Image (tube, grey):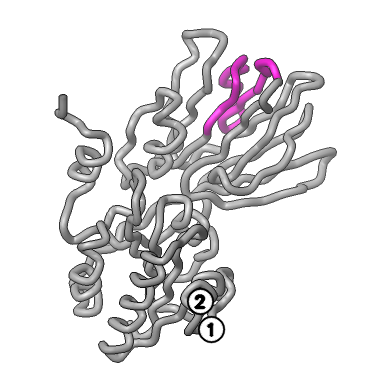
Amino acid sequence: MKRIGIVAKAKAGAETREILSNLARWVEERGARPLLEAETGRRLGTFPGLALADLPAHSDLIVVLGGDGTLLSVARTIGNREVPILGVNLGGLGFLTEVALDEMFPALEKILAGEYRIHRRMMLKAQIHRDGACIAEQCVLNDVVFNKSALARIFALEVQVDGNYLTTFQSDGLIVSTPTGSTAYSLSAGGPIVFPSLDSILLTPICPHTLTNRPILLPVGSTIEVRLRSQHRDVFLTFDGQVGLAFQENDLAVIQRAENTVPMIQSPFKSYFEVLRTKLKWGER
């Protein structure tokens, strides 16, 4: 790996600039070239940067310093490129950025020596149709969320799976997530934790009006169709919690597994179960 892409979270202070400077110097000392994302480069002030969308095409590895939100924004730019991502946590919960800051350089030493394992995380593709035309398409690593605005009442979402009617959720919203996204918004809404390597799609209603509506795990090959069946409801559809659009009555969302995956480097120092114990404080009083 001779070209190391580097992305830091948007709100980075003096401490992060020092970390970036040390990382860039460390990469150069090992005969590799640091490639900083444009905003990251401007914060450091010494390296010209590449647009985030262009970084995967020029990198052999991308190091993400920040939280899960920063990593999600990078993951959506990977496309079908075989560029692995190493997530380094700079505070917060960080299920995706599972490498601690003090583990970053030892982890990178192992990666440059070829001693690493990649776990491919599945993504979802969502297409939004209105009046017979596709108005938006996005791939997500975590989830697609149908949510009400601040003052809106509950609304009705009709859901079909592979052409078969599932139910109409009367709720505050609906989360369609990957196994990776099971530890994000879905977990807060009462969904189960799904091991990342399981090929499945998770549907989790948000505060359902009918208490018998429960989360459901679907086969990975399922095609999920969601229609809004409520009039005059302010509903917003978000992709990985970062981009979105208004979802109107009779709009159709078609959600299925994306063709591409996100290659993420596993921490060489802890298992997924250890990450869960650390982040969720399992067994602590």
Other-residue count near label 2 (Cα within 10 Å), few / some / many at <14 / 14–19 / ≥20: many
The residue closer to the viewer here, 45 or 89, is 45
Name of the residue lying farthest toward the right: 131
The residue closer to the viewer here, 42 or 207, is 42
- CA–CA distance in space, label 2 to label 1: 6 Å
The residue closer to the viewer here, 17 or 35, is 17
Answer with left or right where residue 69 lies relative to residue 90: right
Tell me the residue that label 2 is attached to: 41
Tell me the residue that label 1 is attached to: 48
Q: Which mark is residue 177?
A: none
Secondary structure beneath label 2? helix
Instruction: Give the residue drawn at x 45%, y 80%.
Output: 35
Secondary structure mostly seen in magenta is: strand
Amino acid carrying label 2: it is Gly
Which span of residues is magenta-colored?
152-175
Q: Quadrant of the C terminus?
A: top left
As drawn, 116 above or below 89: below
Percent position (x, y) of residue 278?
Answer: 21, 41
